Image (cartoon, helix red, strand yellow):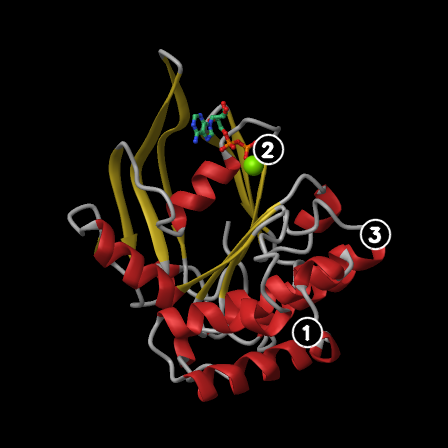
Amino acid sequence: MRPAVPAARGAAPAEETRQPPAVELRGVSKTYLQYHEKVDAVRDVSLAIPAGEFAAIIGRSGSGKSTLLHLLGLLDRPTSGDVLVEGKPTAHLSGAEVAAFRGRRVGFVFQTFNLIARFTVLENVVLPALIQGTRPDAARRRAQGLLERVGVGHRADHKGVHLSGGEQQRVAIARALVNDPALVLADEPTGSLDTRSSAQVMDLLAELHEEGRTLVFVTHDLGLARRAARVVELADGSVVRDTREARRPQARKPRAEATA
Ligand code: ADP
Ligand code: MG
């Protein structure tokens, strides 16, 4: 589906390759103002996500998981520190430059799907492609193909809100893929789903990783987190644990050995 980037497949940690991390936080903090109080949602976090990684972010509610994910995807910008994407600093970029970049390189999946209610399923998936300047007929073809792939092709002409939660999330995954992003970020993607739909959505996300994309997801569910090759735990805006396990599935191509 996406052009082959050999080093990204079954990627080893960045230090073993010449390839820069897909995305890297360097000394990143994010402070929000809530009424007149400052809230340090993310505190001085340095975290590199190598290309091809499959990582889970866990932590209690309010620990900064969503903020961290938004920073990784340039959906939000740090108060201090820098976010490097494929080795390139982004702090100096304008909002428009960041938005253009994000639109092409990052796919987001949210807990509550965030489909546009008055649009059909197909229109929801087509929209980000049109925003990136893809010709409408090509965008529609690609969107329909992705909907087939995630198993909701037969629902293309329905309004998104009429679908079940599991179907809506599969539409949202198709939407996240329409611009063929190298990096897919999912914030509690199964948090609103029943067990069976959760499993289907997790299988889909695992597939995206297997085909060479970098995948980072937030979850409350330790069972789901165990499916990832790396688990990063946050507490109070800081990384308190960061483990990689050899046992965990890596990309389809077997890799020699895990580090850490
Ligand atoms: P999690 O996803 O782990 O539940 P969040 O990243 O959503 O945590 O939030 C971390 C902290 O930052 C919380 O105290 C939350 O209230 C605060 N926060 C998050 N987003 C905002 C915002 N847009 N404005 C103000 N405070 C925020
Ligand atoms: Mg959250």
Residue 78 vs 163, above or below: the answer is above
Residues tagged 1 and 2 counted as in contact (Cβ below 8 A): no
Q: Residues within 10 Å of mark 2 (few under 14, many from 20)?
A: many
Residue 131 vs 32, above or below: the answer is below
Element marked by disc 1 = loop
Q: Is residue 97 left or right of residue 8?
A: left
Q: Residue visible at 62% across and 53% down?
A: 113
Residue sitting farthest toward the left: 92
The residue that label 2 is drawn on is 59
Residue 143 vs 99, above or below: the answer is below
Give the amino acid at mark 3: Thr
Q: Residue visible at 71% across and 42% down?
A: 222
Q: Which mark is residue 137?
A: none
Give the amino acid at mark 2: Gly
Question: From mark 1 to mark 2, how far is it between C-alphas?
Answer: 29 Å
The residue that label 1 is drawn on is 150
Q: Position of residue 67 (x, y in %)?
A: 45, 37
- Front residue of this view, candidates 169 and 73: 169
Question: From mark 2 to mark 3, how far is it between C-alphas?
Answer: 20 Å
Q: Which mark is residue 195?
A: 3
- Front residue of this view, candidates 244 and 213: 213
Q: Is residue 239 visible?
A: yes
Q: Position of residue 36 (x, y in %)?
A: 35, 11
Mark 2 CB near ligand 1 (8 Å cut): yes
The mark nearer the N terminus, 1 or 2, is 2
Q: Is residue 181 visible?
A: no
Give the amino acid at mark 1: Val
The mark nearer the N terminus, 1 or 3, is 1
Q: Is residue 170 left or right of residue 35?
A: right
Q: Is residue 5 left or right of residue 94?
A: right
